[in-house]
Image (cartoon, rainbow, N blue to C red):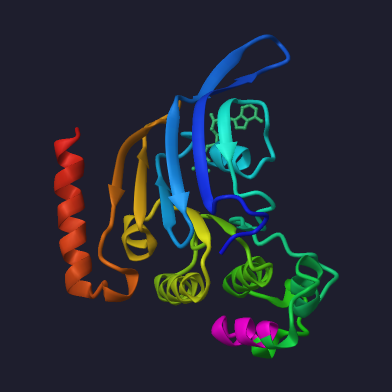
Amino acid sequence: MQRGGGPVRLEVEITGKTYRSAAGGSHQVLAPLKFALQSGEVGVLIGPSGCGKSTMLRIILGLDRDFDGRVARPPEARIGMVFQEPRLLPWRSVEQNVRLAAPDVTDAKLAELFRILELEAHRSHFPGELSLGLARRVALARAFAVEPDLLVLDEPLASLDDALAGRLRDEIATLVASRPVMTLLVTHSLDDAIRLGDRLFFLSPRPARIVQEVPILTPRAERSEVELARIRAELAALLLESK
Ligand SMILES: Nc1ncnc2c1ncn2[C@@H]1O[C@H](COP(=O)(O)OP(=O)(O)OP(=O)(O)O)[C@@H](O)[C@H]1O
């Protein structure tokens, strides 16, 4: 899939990011770091709190241009984002929230998304009537309705109970498999990382750099519980080795 004739690849090469305060102080948040994602790949950023993950996402999304280095996104890439807080418009229904973000979405596409995310019964509800889990699902529906080339998920499963997080994780896997999209997921959960990721980036404490890049070669659909246990053990050994 190509849009605008350019490569469908995200290339990130940051040589540094420093915040400066009005008082003249400064602190470095990102160290030099470099990675790339292909269409169809899920990259996972895993790192300690405050290491600079959100700062990195803002740079990758083009919301913060005050950094050293370069980010190459596919030209005219459509971007879908899911933040930790679902950030829905409170005075709009579930359906309106999705349609406003994705005016070109077809009725059939919307119906499919609402079916996969089990939102059919909530189309006309307002955000204030939704639990956090439901609101996250609406945020996911909104991000997917855009048919993004680049999907950025900032801890989309944080503070949900295990059962719901597991179901939503499966739904994300289904959606990611349904079309070619580059996905960047931030999580603190190694379990989410190995169930969803194709390429894991382990980050150091601030200033963040990539301490280890680990590809997961087993296709997502073939990751049985036995296979996941094998990947987990392999990863534990690798991380121990790198210490
Ligand atoms: N606008 C800003 N001005 C100054 N410092 C900032 C700004 N935004 C973030 N920081 C600092 O940069 C560092 C990295 O913050 P960031 O939010 O990117 O980390 P994070 O890895 O996403 O954290 P968490 O996992 O807790 O969400 C922190 O020390 C934070 O206080």
Q: Nearer the viewer, residue 128 or 55?
A: 55
Estimate the x, y position of residue 91 in percent, counting from the top left: 85, 70
Does residue 241 sit above or below 173 in this rendering? Answer: above
- Quadrant containing the C terminus is top left
- The answer to whether residue 209 is magenta is no
**Main secondary-structure element of the magenta-colored stretch:** helix
Instruction: Please give left or right for residue 220 compared with residue 171 in the image.
Output: left
Q: Residue at x 51, y 29 (%)?
A: 14
Instruction: Provide the residue span drawn in magenta.
Output: 109-119
Q: Residue at x 59, y 46 (%)?
A: 73
- Quadrant containing the N terminus is bottom right
Estimate the x, y position of residue 84 in percent, counting from the top left: 58, 56
Q: Residue at x 43, y 75 (%)?
A: 170
Does residue 7 sit above or below 141 in this rendering? Answer: above
Res 141 → quadrant:
bottom right
Does residue 149 sit above or below 94 in this rendering? Answer: above
Q: Is residue 19 visible?
A: yes
Instruction: Please give left or right for residue 62 compared with residue 72 in the image.
Output: right
Res 38 → quadrant:
bottom left
Estimate the x, y position of residue 167 in percent, counting from the top left: 44, 77
Quadrant field for ligand 1? top right
Q: Nearer the viewer, residue 61 or 54?
A: 61
Q: Is residue 208 visible?
A: no
- The answer to whether residue 111 is magenta is yes
Furthest toward the right, the residue is: 91
